[in-house]
Amino acid sequence: MALKFNLMFPMRAVKHYARWIEGNDLSTVARVVEDAGFDALSMSEHPYPDKEWLADGGHHAFDPFVSLSMIAAATERLRVITYVMVAGYRSPYLAAKAAASLDLLSGGRLTLGMAAGYLHKEFEALGADFAHRGRLFDEAITAMRASWAGGDHVGERFGATGHEALPAPLTPGGPPIWIGGNSGAARRRVAEVADGWMPMAQSGAMAEITRTPPLTDPGTLRELISGVNRRRAEMGRPPADVSFVPFEKDLLRDGDTGAFRSALAPRLDAYAEAGVTWITVEPASRSFSAFVKDVTDLAGLLPTR
């Protein structure tokens, strides 16, 4: 199976969007990505980050459901991905409603990327439970799927009976759920309840910030994916989709799309052999004009459809 390619909207563009977009709009961005041949366009989430984190390399973000709705409305085949929605930032029933609405209105094109989150101060600002975020994440997935199926959920925090949320998502059982993060808990969720995984290449220093294990080399990536898929096979489940921002990403962050493409292209087969099914790329475009050029350049990585 050929690798698929997801383009993440440049996160650094959000802060300066009014200038960055150069009189265009997000619909135009979406059509550029679709016309270039990408399979998906994704949005991150940070509703209220703290200034200290922002000053240390953090970024702002659009609301993922609002922005991805605009993208879906402007395109025909492009999947839209939350990369990632932080589960603890909202009620699972509000999240399920937003996801079901977007999945239905997009014609079943939503992939719901979710993660436990790691920014303590953002959790505090939102009145969210940071200390128990992992356990609540597990229950949230169950509650969301119960909502999509029209059933009740019996649980410690989100238990609810006698309720109904219509319309249901178009995708049977709800949109596919991908789990972000490198932790053992994240891998367990992928093995047991989710449809895909978004491991994150990160140094030891970054691992301390995210509170998840470092991931610095292709060999470790292969071992981790193999372990997840082995557990899935034991449960009678097919291999997971795995979306990965490649180790060569620093070249792209520096704005050199040509060097990034040259470095990544000969390694795509190795990523696929390791179990990666999606490659996610985020251009560092400083304007819409630069974005169009960068997307065109990055499209050289895509297989002939």
Image: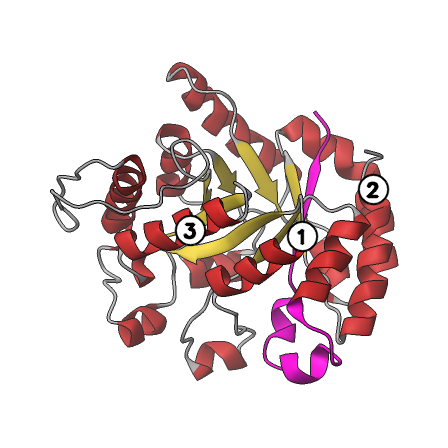
Q: Residue at x 60, y 75 (%)?
A: 14
Which residue range is magenta in the image?
1-26
Q: Position of residue 108 (x, y in %)?
A: 52, 40
Q: Of the two numbered discs 1 and 2 on the same chain, state the one appearing first in sequence.
A: 1
Task: From the top left corner, tell me how far across and down residue 191 is, in percent.
Answer: 40, 29
Q: Amino acid at mark 2?
A: Ala
Q: Residues within 10 Å of mark 1 (few under 14, many from 20)?
A: some
Question: Looking at the image, which residue is at 87% across and 49% down?
Answer: 262
Closer to the camera in the image, 256 or 12: 12
Mark 2, residues whose alpha carbon is within 10 Å: few (<14), some, or many (≥20)?
Answer: few
> Mark 2 highlights which residue?
265
Q: Is residue 232 one of those drawn in magenta?
A: no
Marks 1 and 2, how far apart in space?
A: 27 Å
Residue at x 67%, y 52% (from the top left corner): 75
Quadrant for the N terminus, please. Answer: top right
Mark linked to residue 101: 3
Toward the front, the furthest residue is: 167
Q: Is residue 191 left or right of residue 166?
A: right
Q: Secondary structure at mark 2?
A: helix
Numbered label tally: 3
Residue 289 is drawn in which quadrant? bottom right
User: As shown in the figure, which amino acid type bears the numbered disc 1?
Assistant: Thr
Residue that badge 1 annotates:
75
Question: Could you tell me residue 192's position as x and y percent?
Answer: 35, 29
Give the residue type at disc 3.
Answer: Ser
